[in-house]
Image (cartoon, grey):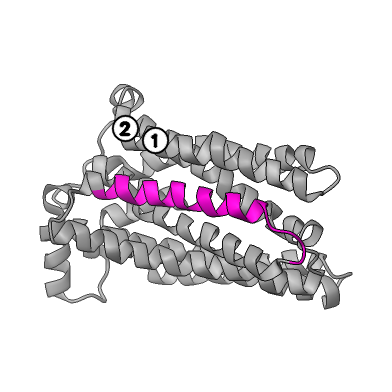
Amino acid sequence: MYPAGQALWANWAPPNERSRLIGFSYAGGQFGNAIIFPIGGLLCAYGFDGGWPSVFYFVGGTGFIWCVCWVILAHDTPDDDKSISDLEKKYIKYSLGEQTKTKKRKNVPWKSILTSPAVWAIVVAHTCGNYGAYMLLTKLPAYMKEVLKFDIKANGAVSMVPYLTFWFVISLSGMLADLLISREILSIAWTRKLMTTIGMLGPAVFLVGAGFMECDQQVEAVVMLTISVGLCGFHFSGYFINHGDIAPQFAGTLFGVSNMMATIPGIFSPYVVSAMTKQGTRQQWQSTLLHCCSCLLCWSSVVHFVG
C-alpha cells in the first residue's frame, strides 16, 4: 500500500503541499495503531470466539470495508477524477509541471537508483527508523506489563496514547515542513534532513529516559514513551516522503525498494527484544532501549544527514 500511495501522491500532491498531504494520509495508519490497542485489549478480554481471535476478525473486516471505499473513491490522476473542479485540476497539473504531461511508461533506471547516494541515505534511514518503530509497536505492551506493571485492559488504553501523539505529530510536522519550503526558509533537501534528524535524535533521547523509569514512575514513563513515539512523526516529513522529491516518476518503485529493506527489522526486532528481555527485568529493558537508540536511531540520522 505504501509504495502505491507514493506513486499516487506523485500525481496529486503539489511540491509545496506534499509534506502535509502525504503526512496527513499516512498518519491514518498511526491512528489505527492507536485505537487497536484499547479495542484489542477489550476484545481479548470480552470478545467472541475465545477472545483474542475476534481481534483478527475485527481488523480483517475493517480492511475489507476500506477496500470497497477505495475502489469507489480513488483515482490515479486528476484527469481521471470527474468530481474535482477544473480550477483545482489545472492548479495540480501546473504545479507538477512536465510530470503530468505524459503517461508514457519509462524504463526504471536501476543502475542510477542503486548507485545514488541519496537513495542509499533514504534506505539506511528508513531501515534504522523502522527498527525502532517496529520494536515499539510490537513490544510496547510487553514493556508496560513487565516493567510498569499495567494490567491488560489498562495496558491497551495507555498504549494508545503514544500513537495518538504520533498521529498528531505527523500532521503537524507536515505543515511545518511545507511552511519551511513554501516560504523558502529552507530548501526541500534541507527540510527533509532537518525533519529526519528531529525524528531520529528526539525519540532516542526520550527512549533512553524511559529506560531509567521504575514501576512506581508509571506517569513519567508513559510521558517519556509518548514523546519518543510522537517525535517519530517527523520521519513522515523527512526520509519517508523523500522518494517523491528525488524521482517523482519512480516514487513508488523507490519506496518499494527502501521499504523492502526497511521491513527486515520488523522480522528481527521482536526476536532481538525477546532474547534481550528473557526475565523481563527493568535492567534488561533498559539495555534493549539503549541498544535501539545508540546503535540504530542516532547512527541512521547521521548517515541521512550526510547523504
Amino acid type indicated by mark 2: Val
Residue 111 vs 79, above or below: the answer is above
Q: Is residue 75 visible?
A: no
Q: Residue furthest right?
A: 50
Q: Which mark is residue 174?
A: none
Q: Nearer the viewer, residue 99 or 286?
A: 286
Is residue 209 covered in magenta?
yes
Q: Secondary structure at mark 2?
A: helix
Q: Residue 116, how many percent across, how many down?
A: 30, 26
Looking at numbered disc 1 in the image, what kind of residue is underneath it? Val
Quick one: 64 or 131, which is closer to the camera? 131
Residue at mark 2: 306
Q: Name above or below for residue 258 compared with residue 19.
A: above
Which sits in the foreground, 284 or 268? 284
Q: Image check: 41 left or right of 90?
A: right
**Would you place residue 136 above or below residue 305 in this image?**
below
| Residue 40 image-quadrant placement | bottom right
For numbered disc 1, what is the local secondary structure?
helix
Q: Number of numbered discs present?
A: 2
Give the x, y percent position of residue 10: 28, 52
Crowding around mark 1 (Cα neighbors within 10 Å: few <14, some 14 to 19, many 20+) is some
Give how far apart the Cα atoms at labels 1 and 2 are: 6 Å
Determine whether label 1 and label 2 are within 8 Å by CB: yes
Q: Mark 2, residues whose alpha carbon is within 10 Å: few (<14), some, or many (≥20)?
A: few
Q: Which residue is mark 1?
A: 302
Image location of residue 146, percent across then percent down:
81, 57
* Residue interval drawn in magenta: 191-216
Is 207 situated left or right of 48 in this image? left
Asked whether the viewer can see residue 116, the reply is yes
> On the image, which quarter does residue 18 sit in?
bottom left
Q: Residue at x 50, y 52 (%)?
A: 203
